[in-house]
Amino acid sequence: MKLRVGAALFGLGVLLLVFAAGLPFYVAPAVTKLPYDLEPTTSVAEAKNARFLKITATGSSVSIEVPQGDLVSNVEVIPQPDDTKDRLPKDLKGDAVIWDVYQTVRRVDNQDVVSQYSTELALYRISGAAASWKEQWLNETGADGTPVGNVKYSGQIYKFPFGTDKRDYQVFDRDLKRAVPAKFVGTEKIKGIEAYRFEQRIENEVLATPESSIQTLVGKFAPGATSGQIVYSNIRTLWVDPVTGSYVNVREQQHKELRPNTGTPTVLLDADFNYTDDTVSRSVETVKDNRFKIGLISFWGPIVAGVLGLLAVVFGVWLVTRPEGGSARHRAEPAVADPTPTRVDQEPVRDTDTVEQPRPQPVGGPLTDEIPPASTNWKSEDPTVPTQRPAPGEVEQR
């Protein structure tokens, strides 16, 4: 029985050791990838007392103004597992996922839409960077029939790599339609977790704007001008979880202005967007949950499995190789001399030279006929006490 138990423990221990060795090399890499069935997420940012361009078309008339008020931005990410399976080319299958993303910016007071966009793109599952996919598109006008391939994404967009490093990264800017460096500036604690802080500074970049839109704006805000430019600046601050690459917090200080060739510049957008506290809290909780899963598989899992496997192997070997249980207790014990002298029956001593005197009858019990030890040489006047037996040739004395 013990042989079977020992062999079973030994086998279990070997399996646990193999499992412990395989976790960080085979299982952990599968966890540190964007899953195909990622749950949709929504991020909310607010900009207090912002200035923004509002264009309203009513029939044949167009109203253009720059009001002031609070804004709220909702960005919804919806993974597309079916499209990922069917539409990606062979060189991206298994390495990338397809996401649809929608953003809507509204006024808080009346819920009017200020701006919106939708896009579809492919992201690498480990790095989180944009993949080169011919079917990606970006719709910023809300019109139907957005041409496929009208944008070329690059760099990081909605997340950073798993295992983010303390270095600069290229981050895509939707207004510029290209990636701009985001510099690593340090680490900060956000609701109990350590996040890497990156800053991307865009200063006085001229946006590619259709001439018809420029003329419309110039006619409204600089009637004496014949042309102009829209100049864009932004300080984008990203707090990134270094383990999962997820955004924990985001801040964008956006500024756009119309600079006509003649006349005074006009501010078209001045907004400081920050993640809401609820969005930050949800991001932190998601990060903690994902960190625990990754740590369990890549660190604690191998340690626990390795220790249990080693103990099972050692105990199994001990059970198989130890002596038969209890056999030592049943071996014949070596003879040990009994210190108690054994009485040996001998022939009675016959006294041929003397006349045997009659012995007194024993009184007091069955032990009165015991012979006292030879070392006891004493006499007693008490007739109830047996006297020493006389040696040959002697007459018993009383």
Image (cartoon, rainbow, N blue to C red):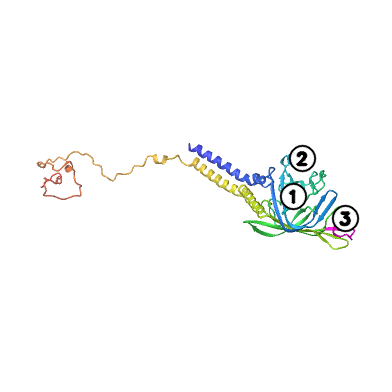
Residue 388 rendering spot, x and y as whole percentages: 15, 46
Work out how far the residue at label 3 is from the one at label 2, CA to CA, in angstroms: 41 Å
Horizontally, is 8 left or right of 33 in the view?
left
Residue 56 position, x and y percent, is 81, 52
Reading the image, the residue beneath label 1 is 103
Q: Mark 2 or mark 1, which is nearer the start of the sequence? A: 2
- Which amino acid type is marked by label 2? Arg
Q: Which amino acid, mark 3?
A: Gln
Q: Earlier in the sequence, mark 1 or mark 3?
A: 1
Give the mark, 3 or 2, whose residue is nearer the N terminus.
2
Between tags 1 and 3, which lies in front?
3
SS class, disc 1? strand
Callout 2 secondary element: helix
Q: CA distance from mark 1 to mark 3?
A: 27 Å
Type of the residue with mark 1: Gln
Q: Residues within 10 Å of mark 2 (few under 14, many from 20)?
A: few
Residue 212 percent coordinates (x, y): 87, 52
Q: Is residue 205 magenta?
A: no
Measured along the vertical axis of the image, is residue 21 above or below residue 204? above
